[in-house]
Image (tube, helix red, strand yellow):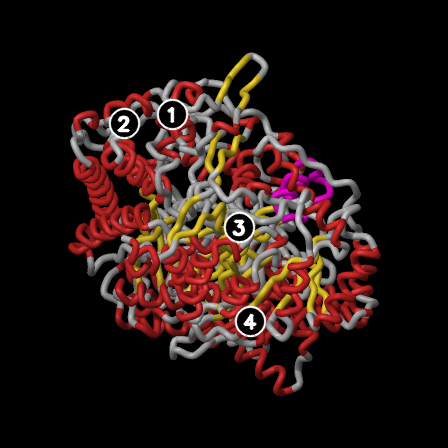
Amino acid sequence: MTARRRRDPTGLIFDLDTFAVHEGPGIRMAVYLKGCPLACRWCHSPESQRAAPELIFLRERCARCGRCVRVCPNHVHRVLASGHHLKRSRCAACGRCVAECAAGALSIKGERVAASTIVSRAERLAPFFRHSGGGVTLTGGEVTLQRKFASAVLRECRALGIHTAIETCGACGWDALKQLADAADLILYDLKLIADAEHRRWTGASNRRILRNAARLAGRNVQVRLPLIPGISDNDDNLRGIFQFMRDAGLPSVALLPYNASAAAKYEWLDRPYEVPGAPQDQARLEEIARMARAQKLEVSVA
Amino acid sequence: MSEPLAVRKARAIALKLSRMPDDLWEGQLFAGSMTLEEPRIHAEGGFPDYVTDAERARAAEQGMSIYSVFGHIVPDYSTLLKKGLRGIRADADAQGVNVRSTDETAFLDSVAIAVDAVMAFAARLAERCERDAKGKDDLHRATELRQMAANLKQVPSGPAKTFWQALQSVWLLHMIFHSTLNGNAIGRLDQYTWPLLKADLKAGRLTPERAAELADCFCLKFNERAKTTDDQRPENRPAEKLDLSKWTRHYTSSQIGTGRDRVDATNHWLQNILIGGLTPQGRDGTNPVTFLLLRSYMRNKMTNPLITVRTHAGTPAALLDRVCETLKDGGGMPAIFNDEALIPALERLGIPRPFARDYTNDGCWEVIIPGRTDFRFQRLSAMLCLEWALNRGQLRIGGAQGGVDTGDPRAFADYEAVWTAFRTQLDAMVARVVGHVAETVNARSTIAPVPLLSALMDGAISSRRDMTAGGARFRTFALLVEGAAHAIDSLTAIKTVVFEQKQATMAQLCDALDADFAGHELLRAKLQSAPKYGNDDPRADEVGRSMIEAFTGAVARHAEGHRELIKFPCGVGTFSWYIGIGDGLGASPDGRRSGEPVSSNFSPALGRDIEGIPGAILSYSGMGHANLPAGAPLDLRLARTLVRGEDGTRRMAGLIRAFVESGGAMMTLTVAETEELRAAQREPENYRSLRVRMGGWCAYFTMLSREQQEHHIRRQEGRK
């Protein structure tokens, strides 16, 4: 059992997309790993952050039948006149309520899958990758938190001739990052805020290690990805700082990620508050930002 | 009425053509129009009656009339362009010495009369062009009109000498067929017109710009009948009650006819053109006309003619890129056919390789061999078979006994018992249809012979038989499975939820179906979350393969005895009738409620293909297409954001190449954003040109019923 486990590690994923277009070139299978060392306040997949399965509740679908209340061993659910309330701290994500929910309001995000399962999915999709210049991207969450699983998937995909990519926030030890970067044909590297205090404030962690790791990846096929969060990361000072850093570090390629306004819905599923202080960028502003990057001799694309 | 029926039919064609208006639209480059209406003489009406009361009564007993001409067929336009009608008539005349019966004499006479009538009509159009040219101050237009007159003196009576003449010849025959009750299709236009364009370009008779103009004007002609009147709009349609007397005949389809579905199909007239693909010799047939037609479609931005492109492993990248750009422009055009799947399937059906390689679609998407095939089809509902298996042969809607009594479904002890009952129903339905078709195979010739089409049908003149009496080289009757995805999902749900996981008994399932799931919501949720076709999930796909095998096996078995008479190619399809088809079906074990629409053609059930576009393609491609030579389209929608820009084009071309490699037969891709469709519902005025692919054709979105619009919106767009 243990021996088999080592050969075929499992990972915790919260989603898998077989026609992903924002995670590298061509048609890609994107695997979203669950668990992240950062807690960016704007994160568009808040369900990616916890490194454990969790209950998702689509409030508008709830028929208030109360079946979940009856089957839950931990008394998580309460259906009152005032609505359906969840005591999430008690939830073990056992899924019993999900099986009883006829309305489809409850589900679990976070599934344990074997690396071999992911690889055989990728193998089935290989013609789509081959003909479109696509491949597999491991993203998250944070891929380096599940390095054994990720490394197995990447190595085996590569052995099958499938193009591999990782997307990382860089908040990890160099060993883990290097191991995965060695097995990836493309590294999508997220940079958000250049000022450490700001970084701590909005993501809950320092960016020093992130920047150091980024610099060590110079010379590899790296694309820096820069989420343009209104009022947080999209100001000139921050952008100029990041572009300057990239130039100095020898990271020549950046993709601008305009703000995705649909993220708020997912916070509702998890009963978490969500707020972003500014307004999304318009086309003129995006072009202005692209010009700033080009001024630092960077290749720019807009996702 | 002493003359034979075939001769009377030919005279009716001649009479109608003699009264057809010869007016020209200002600026048009092709003569002959279906819509310059004189009140009683236009495309669809005013056909002279040519039958006796006795003939009429006899036909009525078999559910037929003078309108039982099937249409859909592709005439032999290649021969038309090479020989001209005079050459074809000479062939018919030469057969006079071989005549062995009065029927044969009547047939040859009918061909001569019909062909002469077409030539007379062309001569009249030529005179009209000349007359109009004389009165024109505009020299440029006068020259055009004189050239048109000259064209009409050469074609269709003689062989086409130029690209312009080729298009004029094909157009004229096309509009004549459509004006004489026979809605036929165009076939491989790029293959049979390219030699003429090539010669024009080489001789310097035509510039590429002028060729493009000709292609544009030719394509525009097909839209002369377009109707986009306000009464078609969903908000202006009266509420309609289901009329159970409108069940499709023979209880093989669950469709209940409605005005809604009929109006939705208003702008479909079977005007299909096919481009690209292998030549009979096995080379890639892509040529400049292939590109001209795609460009015309983009420039015209209309719903007609419909364009389908044949692809194979060696399809040039330039063509695929152009195909993707056209698809991105909207309308789900062109549809994508895969030579790698369809040619071997046709060969298995017994079509020799060079003919198989020359296949085309008919007036919709079904596969035929152009100019050589008498084709008809019928839909056989897998969902009705399942409904009967679970309801002792009775329809849930209306309660009639449609199938055989396969016993009490509550007593089915294992999945095998369910499967056996389903298979018994399917086998009985196939046997019934095949038997009926074989028995009545020549019936149309006794009421609706087709002398003009027979003149352009390989085999008819040489065998001195009308196409409807077996004159065509190939005679096929396609049997098309209807409701396939839901039948697969339903059988899979029974297999997994009832018998593997034992989450319910057969009795509970039957109770839930009887109650249309009222009070059985949890069971419904479990059935809905069972494995589904369209997700590359072997649990559902194996059931799907078995179902298709059971069907094609039953057809092969029952058709065996009629091999010399007629071929029965199998396929899967609903056309655009998926809403009416759902109207006639009760609740089903996949969780579908009574009356809910089914998915189109061989597409996954709406909202159930959650694994994305590649999953849908992989499931679909594994469904035994080697035995589905009639075809089985997979209809998909792609969100515009997924294929934006040059990267998007590359991605889309990759998707098509992967589709070809995976072995799927037919795919339609409509590029439209959900938000875009919602906006079109809110502000129809601003989206009048928004086109969507619908079954075998293309429609203006804002002219569709609410039910159709919702269907398009619910179709997966490939975006998480």
Residue at the disc numbered 1: B522
Residue at the disc numbered 2: B504
Residue at the disc numbered 3: B718
Frontmost of labels 3 and 4 is: 3
Horizontal and vertical percent for residue A261?
Answer: 69, 43
Q: Nearer the viewer, residue B660 or A203?
A: A203
- Asked if the residues shown at circle 3 and circle 4 are in contact, with their CB atoms under 8 angstroms apart, the answer is no
Determine whether, in the image, residue B131 is placed left or right of residue A128: right
Q: Amino acid at mark 3?
A: Gly
Residue at the disc numbered 4: B319
Label 2 secondary element: loop
Q: Amino acid at mark 1?
A: Leu
Q: Disc 4: which chain?
A: B
Distance, label 2 to label 4, CA atoms, is 53 Å
Distance, label 3 to label 1, CA atoms, is 28 Å
Q: Which image quarter holds the C terminus of chain A?
A: bottom right
Frontmost of labels 2 and 4 is: 2
Label 1 secondary element: helix
Frontmost of labels 2 and 3 is: 2
Frontmost of labels 3 and 1 is: 1
